[in-house]
Image: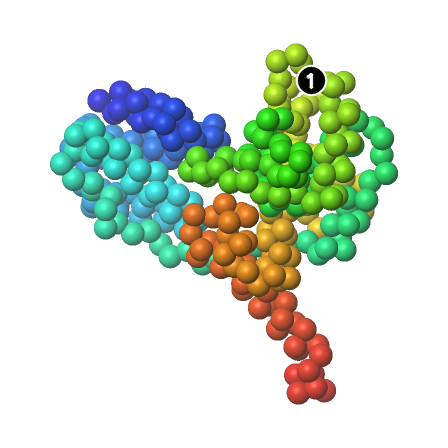
Amino acid sequence: MFETELVIFFRYLATEKRYSVHTISNYTRDLNRFIDFCRQSGIDDWQSIDSQHIRNYLARLHRQGLAAKSIHRMLSSIRSLFKYLLRRHKLAKNPAMGVSAPKVQRKLPEVVTPDDLSHLMSLNENDPLAVRDMAMMELLYGCGLRLAELVTLDMTDIEWQSQTITVTGKGNRQRTTPFGRHANEALKKWITKRSLFIKDDDKAVFVSRQGNRISHASVQQRMKKWAGVKGMKQRIYPHLMRHSFASHLLESSKDLRAVQELLGHANLSTTQIYTHLDFQHLAKVYDSAHPRAKKK
């Protein structure tokens, strides 16, 4: 009973919502786990699931020690599924509406300083893969890209004359973002090496040694490698570049709306977390510099 509608729902996420393979994998894992709970509770059809069943399920996850953020993701998956079933007239009402998850305490995102970034990306290497890695890091930081946006970038997404790229982010939202001089130089240098690896029909900007579109894991591994080569103590990973892009841009411009557009955030509240980072920086400057703030 459950399987047929789940298969149709996952197909809908892939074809109509155009969610990434990674996102669909999360939905699959979360919803299969929920369905297992329903079966253990003696429920074998959608109509029998009510809001109390969902609350009981979330309570079990909480007792098992699952983080509040993960429980929120679980509930979001369940809500999306029932919303879809409601549209398909498989249900009379959405049992997930009104169900709340434990409150998530948002952690401030980690960032890396501009000086450390300059040190990381000062690679004087002519090895084609090193040139590729430099271009990837320059785009991640220079455009504030998500990892998925970087690896799915095609040659046709680059507008050289205006120095912009068009990417498709979360929720299938497209945005066009500029890239600066350093990213432009690094990208052009990589394009001259790219022909050593690409296959005839490959449109991907960034490819592996085998000529296939580069994977998420490969980007992460290569960044970790270069951080080690450069002797950096801080853990370096793709999303750190996006956090740093947002924080540094907001610190200089104070233009929250512009940063929201460049990041591709649907809601301004998501971008506002970087204002707290900016305030932390200001507080540190005050504590270290103001005569009345200095400790004896």
Look at mark 1 in the image and give the residue it sits on: 198
Query: Where is residue 80 drawn, in percent x and y?
Result: 31, 38
Q: Work out whether residue 144 or residue 234 is closer to the camera in this orientation and state it.
A: 144
Above or below residue 169? Residue 9 is: above
Query: Where is residue 33 drawn, in percent x and y?
Result: 35, 33
Quarter of the picture containing the C terminus is bottom right
Q: Work out whether residue 98 or residue 114 is closer to the camera in this orientation and state it.
A: 114
Q: Work out whether residue 19 or residue 160 is closer to the camera in this orientation and state it.
A: 160
Quarter of the picture containing the N terminus is top left
Above or below residue 288? Residue 280 is: above
Q: Is residue 237 visible?
A: no
Query: Where is residue 46 drawn, in percent x and y?
Result: 19, 31
The residue located at (55%, 40%) in the rendering is 176
The answer to whether residue 179 is left or right of residue 228 is left
The residue located at (63%, 67%) in the rendering is 281
Query: How was the colour assigned to the protein in this rendering?
Result: rainbow
Q: Amino acid at mark 1?
A: Ile
| Mark 1 crowd level (few <14, some 14–19, many ≥20, 10 Å Cα) | many
| Direction front: furthest residue | 161
The answer to whether residue 130 is left or right of residue 32 is right
The answer to whether residue 207 is left or right of residue 257 is right
The residue located at (35%, 23%) in the rendering is 11
The residue located at (77%, 50%) in the rendering is 118
Q: Is residue 268 visible?
A: yes
Above or below residue 98? Residue 2 is: above
Above or below residue 276? Residue 151 is: above
